[in-house]
Amino acid sequence: MSLVYDAGRRVHVRAPGKLNLSFEVGHAGDDGYHDVASVYQAVSLFEDVWATHGDDFSIAVTGDVDVSGVPLDERNLAVRAARLVTRAVGWNGGIHLDVHKGVPVAGGMGGGSADAAAALVAVNELVGGGLSGSELQELGAELGADVPFALLGGTAVGTGRGDELAPALARGRFDWVLVPSDGGLSTPTVYGELDRLRAEADIRPDRVAPTVDPAVLRALRAGDPVGLGKSIRNDLQLAAVTLQPELAVVLKTGTAHGALGALVSGSGPTVAFLAGGEQHGRDLADRLSGDGLRALHVHGPVAGARVL
Ligand code: ATP
C-alpha cells in the first residue's frame, strides 16, 4: 500500500440515514447490550462529509437540521472514524472533516453512524489507505452497531448488536414520510425504559436470539407496500412513546391520513409512515404538513457511503 499526500485534495462522501422496518429486541446480556434482529433500509436523507489534510484532527458541522447537539471534539463519531483509519493504515498526519447533516440529530435514524461511515470511506480515499470494504466494515463495528449498515446501504438484516449484516432483497422503491421531532431521544435511555417496562410487566424475552418476522422480508422481496405496512414493528416503540407521549398523537395522525404503516424509527423519536407510492407519499406529506407537522418525503433503498 502506498500512502499519498496531496495538500489540496478534498474527498466528498455521502452516506444515508436509515429506518428500522422491523426491530426485535431480545434479552439484555451481562454487559447490558441487547441482542437485536433488525431490518434496516437506507433512505434518501443524507449526510455529506468532506475530508482534507490538516495539522490535527478537527471537524466543522453544518446542517439542514438543528446541529447544536453535535459534539465537535473527540466524542464525534466522524472524528473517531478518521483517527481509526489513519491508525489502521499508518498515516501520521491530521485530518479536517466538514460535515453537512441532513439526518435529524438523536432522531433514531443513525445520522452520527452515517457520518462515521462517510468519514471512514473519505479518509481511506484521501490518504490512499487501500482498506477493503470488509476492513472498513470491521473498523465501523468498533464505532457503533449502525455504522456497518451505513457503509453497506440498501436493505439488510442485522443481528447480534445489529452489526452482523446480511443484504435483503427489496424490489422497487418504497416511499416513506418522516416526521422528525424537536427533541432527541438518547438510545441508552430508550433501552433503559424498555427494560423497565418489561420488568414492570414481568416480560422476560427468550434467551434465544430474536429473529426477523418473515412477513417483512416477504413484502420487501415482493415490492408490496401494503404487506410491508401490516408487518413493520419496533420493540423500542412503546419505550420511546412512554418517554415522549406526543409521539402517540403523531402516529395516530399519519394513520388517520391513510399511511399503510407507521412506526417510530430505531430508538426514536423520528416517526416513519409508509406510503403506497410516490404520489401517495407526496399527498401524505402534504396532509401531515396541513396538520402543522414537519413532514419529509423520502424513499428507500438507497446506496451506502460512497465517494461522489
Ligand atoms: P443511534 O445511532 O444511537 O440510534 P441516533 O440516530 O438516534 O443514534 P445520532 O444523530 O446518530 O442519533 O446521535 C446520537 C448522539 O451521538 C448525539 O446526541 C451526539 O451526542 C452523539 N454524536 C457523536 N457523533 C455525532 C455526529 N457525527 N453526529 C451527530 N451526533 C453525534
Image: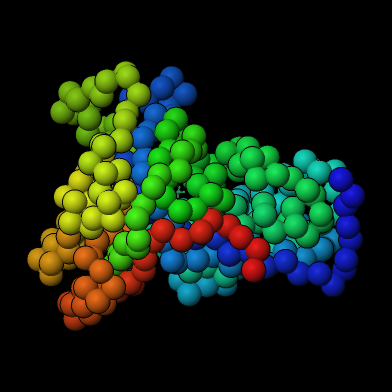
| Residue 50 position within the rendered picture, expressed as x and y whole percent measured from the top left | 68, 67
280 versus 270 height, above or below: below
Q: Nearer the viewer, residue 84 or 72?
A: 84
| Residue 273 position within the rendered picture, expressed as x and y whole percent measured from the top left | 24, 61
Q: Nearer the viewer, residue 97 or 255?
A: 255
Q: Quadrant of residue 254?
A: bottom left
Q: Nearer the viewer, residue 246 or 206?
A: 206
For image coordinates 30% across by 43% down, the residue present is 217
Q: Quadrant of residue 9?
A: bottom right
For image coordinates 35% across by 55% down, the residue present is 171
For image coordinates 31% across by 30% down, the residue present is 211
Q: Quadrant of the N terminus?
A: top right
Q: Quadrant of residue 307?
A: bottom right
| Residue 142 position within the rendered picture, expressed as x and y whole percent measured from the top left | 61, 37
Q: Quadrant of the C terminus?
A: bottom right
| Residue 117 position within the rendered picture, expressed as x and y whole percent measured from the top left | 59, 52
Q: Nearer the viewer, residue 250 or 208?
A: 208
Q: Looking at the image, can residue 264 be seen?
A: no
For image coordinates 57% across by 38% down, the residue present is 141
74 versus 308 height, above or below: above
Q: Count every numbered label the image shows and give the total.
A: 0
Q: Is residue 302 shown left or right of residue 181?
A: right
